Image (spheres, rainbow, N blue to C red):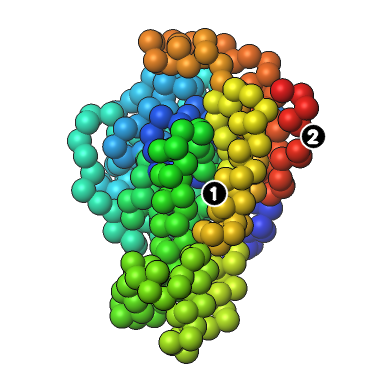
């Protein structure tokens, strides 16, 4: 009989998402994967952006006909979709490049996907998710061990980030509720939050507890375990870095999701110029950006907060 795998041998899954495209999440997740691989960790990077897959640009990978879509459309074995890259210890499951939009993924398929991932003999699995709050994106995000969000400091980006996190919270809440009636009540409460004097996502849960015995302490405890890791991208000055702490505070206080401010990346004009002109071109990462990636990775691994004294070094 095969021995049960220990927790140490089950790969840790990191997923990166957000409410808006163009914030740099694909670049960040690819650099995190490269960093982990450079330290001898066996890493699989998955392009789970079904609408605009572009991980291959960031790891200099020549895409093949195989893609993650084959798992969901044709029931292909996940192991057969893993492709080697030129980077030691890093393999990839590429996204679909044929431009065909995928109509949707059934819940059972998602669960089978994650069950198969957890059987893989690797240390880390990193996933790049599509932008926005589609159901499949939220479900993939919620199944990850480390849930990472990225924003820049544009008003629209931050607003979309809050929208994404709120939808993540309510998606988790919906999964804990036993009846469709209660699920509908959640949205009714939120839509009428002024009437019910609801100010935070957590207020919805507390209100549910008053009107239904089915919303018990166990459900609230499971919700309290929801954690995300925040990265602020394209910062230009120390005040921008401090804004990250403000965003974190809002996520924790008003969206009721424990948030770790894992770090930031400074704006690098030449780096982003290269991406916009020739995305497949091999690019050079400055030592400063590399060090910031390392700090972010360490904070995510430990579920720890960025130290405020880092701001002195900007």
* Residue named by callout 1: 147
Counting other residues with Cα less than 10 Å from the Cα at mark 1, is it few (<14), some (14-19), or many (20 or more)? many
Identify the image quadrant of residue 47. top left
- Residue 144, x across and y down, in percent: 52, 52
Mark 2 secondary-structure assignment: helix
Q: How many labels were placed on the picture?
A: 2
Name above or below for residue 181 compared with residue 28: below
As drawn, is 79 to the left or to the right of 29? Answer: left
Identify the image quadrant of residue 295. top right
As drawn, is 58 to the left or to the right of 122? Answer: left
Viewer-proximal residue among 258 and 253 = 253
As drawn, is 13 to the left or to the right of 179? Answer: right
Name above or below for residue 306 compared with residue 181: above
- Asked if residue 4 can be seen in this view, the reply is yes
Instruction: Say if mark 1 contacts mark 2, CB within 8 Å.
Output: no
Viewer-proximal residue among 162 and 133 = 162
Residue shown at the point (21%, 39%) measured from the top left: 101
Q: Farthest residue in the bottom direction? A: 213
- Residue 48, x across and y down, in percent: 39, 41
Q: CA distance from mark 1 to mark 2?
A: 25 Å
Q: Nearer the viewer, mark 1 or mark 2?
A: 2
- Residue 53, x across and y down, in percent: 35, 32
Query: In the picture, which quadrant includes the N terminus?
Result: bottom right
Residue shown at the point (49%, 83%) measured from the top left: 209
* Residue named by callout 2: 309
């Amino acid at each position: 009989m095969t021995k049960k795998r220990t927790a140490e041998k089950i790969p840790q899954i990191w997923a990166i998402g957000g409410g808006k495209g163009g914030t740099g999440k694909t670049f960040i997740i690819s650099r995190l994967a490269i960093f982990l691989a450079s330290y001898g960790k066996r890493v699989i990077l998955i392009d789970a952006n079904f609408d605009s897959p572009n991980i291959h640009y960031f790891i200099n990978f020549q895409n093949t006909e195989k893609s993650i879509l084959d798992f969901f459309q044709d029931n292909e074995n996940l192991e057969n979709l893993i492709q080697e890259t030129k980077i030691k210890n890093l393999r990839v499951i590429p996204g679909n490049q044929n431009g065909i939009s995928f109509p949707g993924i059934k819940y059972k398929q998602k669960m089978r996907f994650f069950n198969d991932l957890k059987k893989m003999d690797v240390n880390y699995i990193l996933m790049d998710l599509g932008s926005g709050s589609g159901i499949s994106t939220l479900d993939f995000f919620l199944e990850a061990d480390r849930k990472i969000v990225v924003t820049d400091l544009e008003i629209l980006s931050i607003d979309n980030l809050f929208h994404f996190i709120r939808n993540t919270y309510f998606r988790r809440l919906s999964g804990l509720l036993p009846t469709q009636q209660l699920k509908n009540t959640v949205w009714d409460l939120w839509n009428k939050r002024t009437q019910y004097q609801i100010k935070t996502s957590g207020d919805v849960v507390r209100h549910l507890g008053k009107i239904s015995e089915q919303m018990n302490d166990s459900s609230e405890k499971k919700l309290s375990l929801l954690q995300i890791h925040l990265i602020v991208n394209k910062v230009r000055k120390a005040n921008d870095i401090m804004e990250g702490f403000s965003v974190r505070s809002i996520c924790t206080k008003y969206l009721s999701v424990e948030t770790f401010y894992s770090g930031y990346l400074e704006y690098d004009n030449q780096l982003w110029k290269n991406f916009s002109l020739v995305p497949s071109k091999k690019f050079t990462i400055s030592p400063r950006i590399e060090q910031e990636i390392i700090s972010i990775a360490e904070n995510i691994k430990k579920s720890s907060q960025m130290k405020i004294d880092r701001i002195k070094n900007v």
